[in-house]
Amino acid sequence: MALLEVVTGPILAVQEFYLLAGRALRNMFREPHYSDDIVLQMDNIGVGSLPIVVMTGFFSGAVMALQLARALAQWGQTGKVGTAVSITLVRELGPALTSLMVAGRNASGMASEIGSMKVTEQIDAMRALGTDPIQKLVTPRLIATCVVLPLLTIIADFVGVFGGYVVAAGMLDVNGRQYWTSVWQALGWDDVTQGLLKPFVFAFVIALVGCYYGLRATGGTQGVGRATTQAMVAASVLIFVLTFFLTRIFTSQLVSAS
Amino acid sequence: MPRGTSSSVLLPDAPPPASAGVLRFEHVSVAFDDVPALQDVSFEVRQAETRIILGAAGSGKTVLLKTALGLVQPQSGSVHVFGQDITRMTEQQLFGIRSKLGMLFQESALFDSLTIEENVAYPLVNQKAIQCPIEDVSKRVREALRFVELEHTLSRFPSELSGGMRRRVAIARAVVTTPPLLLYDSPTAGLDPITAHTIMALIIKERDLSKIATLIVTHRYQDGALMANFRYNPDNGKLEPARGVGNNITRTTKFLVLREGRLVFEGTQAELEASTDAYISKFRKQSGG
């Protein structure tokens, strides 16, 4: 009996999460569409996250160049630092770090904003006044995150590669033309595909996890704080777990293709 | 709801229209995680009638109102709003029913990100069944805000208003669609006595001007006593005792008492005051009666 009670909670939570995801997706094709809210969220998530994404991208690229140059120097291949930086950033670090930054900033933001509305009965008021809260609050956030996260990842990738260039050219005496040529030659379509598909999947996780924890917030301001923390932790962990599985899928496809 | 124009206002003591069932609870039980919130609750409100629901904190008062709105689904029993059983309705179907109900939430529940004007306009713009022409929205919002004497706050945000003012704006939002049934959840909770009296005066004014059914949840007996014994005089804009021949207010106002989710009393003020039950007497005593 006790085991059943322990298992029931998580199963119901997963069920609620999938129901929320289903309703949010269905609402994309149903009237009314809150385009103003979508634009507002795109501004909040996209433009608002730009400074931290640029900073993270630049310094992760710079650090990658420093670390990999040291390893490559053992084989006298410091000139290949651009290849290593670009592949690592575009395939893995760009999507993962950008998504983690956005999760930290926006999954928690969504949870706190929607959670505050929940505990102050604004969600109930919305339903009482003829609005579906999932249509009004969740779907615009989901659409906005799915649009801007891949774009933010592209920016983070580029700024990261540029960060690598600054280190390579300024500290490692790598020729600039050589660096950019190795970057360009290293990247294939499969790298770009997985580099853009991953943030698209992570966008679903960030928006839905943030909204899910916000909508189930209870217990006043303390409950909102708890929902905020849970949303950020859950979104971050899920991003890491999904990174592994998505990479596994892509690498297995490459192996079978070769 | 032509606020401020007495010509189309019905006289407070005019007989209520032919009794029509507005809200009916039939053996309604609600539970959250197997903890009962309402147990076998049955009552009925007819057109132009008032029900005062008294109960201690946690007795199920708010759950009862949310069940009437279809925000909470009962485990058993049925809820009929304007003759329609809302118990098995989908959320989309409920939107149509909810457009006939106005609700004042306990904490006002105004949308923080919207101005006062946008808040009051929200039901007019978003409730499909209302079908308010867009050019009339602003006029009706101003009318509703004039009713609560807050027309000057149009462009302000809820956070810029005091608790009492927010409550009044929430009343304006609840009445802007002229719903035939109004639900008030603890309208005077947390307010000072003067502001609480202002809020109650507005509720009585709305009841008497529009002749609507009213369901008011409160833990303050004096709010109920005010509702049962006073009427709004449109000539001088003040409350006055509802006495004399043709006084329907006291007759159509009934008290319900909730205790741990169960309805333990339903009757008039006189019957409530005659009750010797210890729990019911507590509400009476708190007002010094």
Image (cartoon, coloured by chain):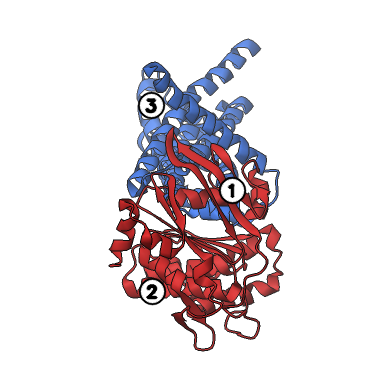
Chain colours: A blue, B red
Chain letter for the residue marked with disc 2 in the picture:
B
Toward the bottom, the furthest residue is B236
Looking at the rendered structure, whether the residues under marks 2 and 3 are on a common chain is answered as: no
> Callout 3, which amino acid?
Ala
Residue A165 against residue A122 in the figure, above or below = above
Instruction: Tell me the kind of residue under disc 1.
Output: Pro
Q: Residue at x 60, y 40 (%)?
A: A24
Q: Are marks 2 and 1 in contact (CB under 8 Å)?
A: no
- The reply to whether dot 1 and dot 3 touch (C-beta < 8 Å) is no
Select label 2 or label 1 by which is in front. Answer: 2
Q: Position of residue B281 (x, y in %)?
A: 32, 57
Tell me which label, 1 or 3, sits earlier in the chain.
3
Pointer 2 with pointer 3, Cβ within 8 A: no
Residue A219 marker = none
Q: Are marks 2 and 1 on the same chain?
A: no
**Which residue corresponds to mark 3?**
A69
**Residue at image mark 2:** B197
Is residue B211 visible in the rendered structure shown here? Answer: yes
Q: Which residue is mark 1?
A: A140
